[in-house]
Image (spheres, rainbow, N blue to C red):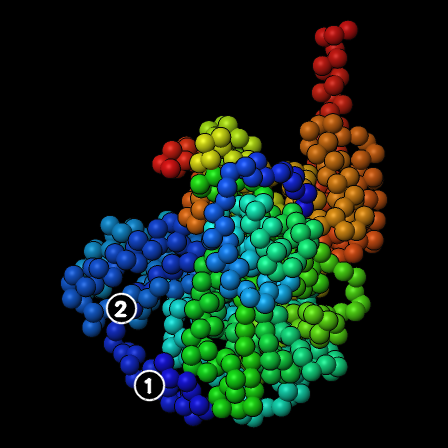
Amino acid sequence: MKRLKNIEELIKFRKSIETEHSPDMIRIFICTTGCRALGAEEVYNAFKSEIKKQSLENKVEVVDTGCQGLCARAPVLTIEPMGIFYGRATETDVPEIISQTILKGEIIERLCYTEAGKRIPYIKDIPFYGKQKKIVLRNCGNINPKSINEYILREGYAAISKVLTGMTPDEVINEIKNSGLRGRGGAGFPTGNKWEFVRKADGDIKYIICNGDEGDPGAFMDRAVLEGDPHSVIEGMLVGAYAIGSRKGIIYVRAEYPIAVEHLKIAIEQARNLGLLGENILGTNFSFDLDIKMGAGAFVCGEETALIASIEGKRGMPRPRPPFPATSGLWGKPTNINNVETFANVPVVILRGSEFFKSIGTQTSKGTKIFALAGNVKNTGLVEVPMGTTLREIVFDIGGGVPGRKKFKAAQMGGPSGGCVPAQHLDLQIDYETVKEVGAIMGSGGLIVMDDSTSMVEIARYFMEFCQDESCGKCVPCRIGTKRMLDILTRITKGEGKKEDISLLKELAEVTKMASLCGLGQTAANPVLSTIRYYINEYEELIDKKHAQADIQQTPAT
Amino acid sequence: MHKVVVSDKESAVSVDLTKCQSILSKYNQATPADLIPILQQMQDTYGYLPKDAIEEITTRTLIPLSKIYGVITFYSQFSLIPRGKHTIKVCTGTACHIKGAPDIKKKITEILHINEGKTTNDYKFTYEPVACLGTCFLAPIMMIDKRYYGKLTTEKTETILKSY
């Protein structure tokens, strides 16, 4: 690949890819990231060899993509331009797909998505996709993430071109501010304001970090974006770096995500070869390069000051703020940290304008949000919806509801820092504020559906066990508070609870919340508080049952 | 983040330090920021962090031994004791938890006769729970080395383990 010397060369390069990209080609897109666990790579290879065997190379192409969303049907594939969706395909189905569907245009019924006993062969008719709005996931599942050409073809690196040719850093910041984009890592801090702080901070050297330490159990949207469209994150970082005046970026990724690391490495290498990373990007004065840092297994490293400590090669423990990373971050320099999903939004805001972005969402929360839909729900998978979509639409219209004869009980939102949203709030329009009001948080977007067989006290205990285990131990309220709360919750679930346990839990929760150093401790009690708020009867029942059981046991003895 | 530090049982056994040296040779002017990547490569090479290799790191990088041990004991990825040939990571994330991960964990303990965080006597398997593998749609799930096994049942788990 030749280094692109200026923006005209990028445009020319895009045109040349377009010419090569034959519109008559039938393309089979198959997810080989998340679906890999259920044999997607074998299916992909089978397609490759079958196409070769039948000498169809000029007619049919198989593309290995990132996540296509409907993970419940893994391994999934779509066939374009027909718009056919097949799920649960195996190697043995491949010759039939080629001979029947590709060559004759016939649908193979058993591979189709089914809803209420009806087979739905076309993507456009599948309700799971109907209510979604794909901004961040615009390319995910539609391109080969290992090919920079496919990204460039779909307006890739056009946002950074636009910024470099016609926008000052302040104009970029204003555009992001005007768009209303807020941090997708969970806290929802306005991205433009954050960038402005770092831009205004004193210092020649500034860093920009992408937080890909997605540690919340039940969240996999960052993994999907990094695996399925790594260039969109790199481009978002480029725009951010230009805005704040940074020459050096770091992407911090969890060690548990090997495919994400592999795809990022490839993407960075390709961007460097084309001169989209490095010195004098596209012939301008702007220079920027990126490194990947792999986490080593510590949930607390998702907290920004702990993440910085980890990059510096230390134990990943948080420190008090202020000073905020915006003034004193990595190596004491002004540092901007955004989440993967936040960065992936940036190229869209720049290209389509802040007014477009603002037109989606609610009063306080603009744009879309990706949710990782999992647990007791029919269509587990990755879902991107406009802010303000109701929980009911996500769980029932998109998610297909609870399987079997069980009933929806609650949706756990925001992982160990979040809470359980009960059925009475199903019509809640989800945004940063409304979710908080009902006792959960948006968090990174994990959404675990629970049916009526789930014990809420056990869920509270489960999350507390997680927080207690992951507490770094630096500050006392978190270290001891989580331990004591776990002890009490374990006791209750074992049927050894005491009457005063509930009030004691509430008191401990308040103290841990108020006095802990970082977000981990400050939010660790949320699952407890939210389950006490909505399901206090379950706590009481477990506590009372113990007395009842004791009475029965005592009777024969006397 | 409590981790039990166990002394290197195998320290009597000599460790081939050439691999360690070849990793370190890539870091001629190592900074503290290189420590975690160095440890990650060592762990990949040896399967754990042998005492001799750690001492070699301190000699070559001048990072104090106390700092190195501090980092090793903080992150769950690092191990000071030899690990099994294969690592079984059972996801204990929320989705897996409500879809039966506790039963899978019980089954593995039953088959391998070891508890979480331990290695079998024949050093074939190291078994550890992991917070979330980010593949909730396949819950319950485990990973053996770099391979995912989704939608587990206790029977399926047994068959998979026996295939190794």
Quadrant in which the N terminus of chain A is drawn: bottom left
Chain containing mark 1: A
Where is residue A34 drawn, in percent x and y?
A: 43, 56
Snapshot quadrant of residue A112 = bottom left
How dense is the environment of label 2, judged by Cα within 10 Å: few (below 14), some, or many (20 and up)? Answer: some
Q: Which residue is mark 1?
A: A16
Chain containing mark 2: A
From the viewer's perspective, tell me whether residue A143 is left or right of residue A100: right
* Residue kind at label 1, given as amino acid type: Ser
Where is residue A490 drawn, in percent x and y?
A: 70, 34
Where is residue A415 drawn, in percent x and y?
A: 63, 52
Where is residue B48 drawn, in percent x and y?
A: 53, 45
* Residue kind at label 2, given as amino acid type: Glu
Q: Residue furthest top?
A: A558
The circle on residue A429 is none
Snapshot quadrant of residue B80 = top right
Taking depth in this image into account, of A292 and A389 the one nearest to the observer is A292
Snapshot quadrant of residue B58 = bottom right
Task: State whether residue A92 appears in this view.
Answer: yes
Task: State whether residue A423 appears in this view.
Answer: no
Q: Is residue A331 above or below residue A509?
A: below
At 53% across and 72% down in the image, what residue appears?
A233
From the viewer's perspective, tell me whether residue A296 is left or right of residue A130: right
At 67% across and 52% down in the image, what residue appears?
B65
From the viewer's perspective, tell me whether residue A266 is left or right of residue A346: left
Quadrant in which the C terminus of chain A is drawn: top right
Chain-order first, disc 2 or disc 1: 1
Q: Which residue is mark 2?
A: A61
Say whether marks 2 and 1 touch (CB < 8 Å).
Answer: no
Q: Give the number of callouts.
A: 2
Q: Is residue A159 above or below residue A386?
A: below
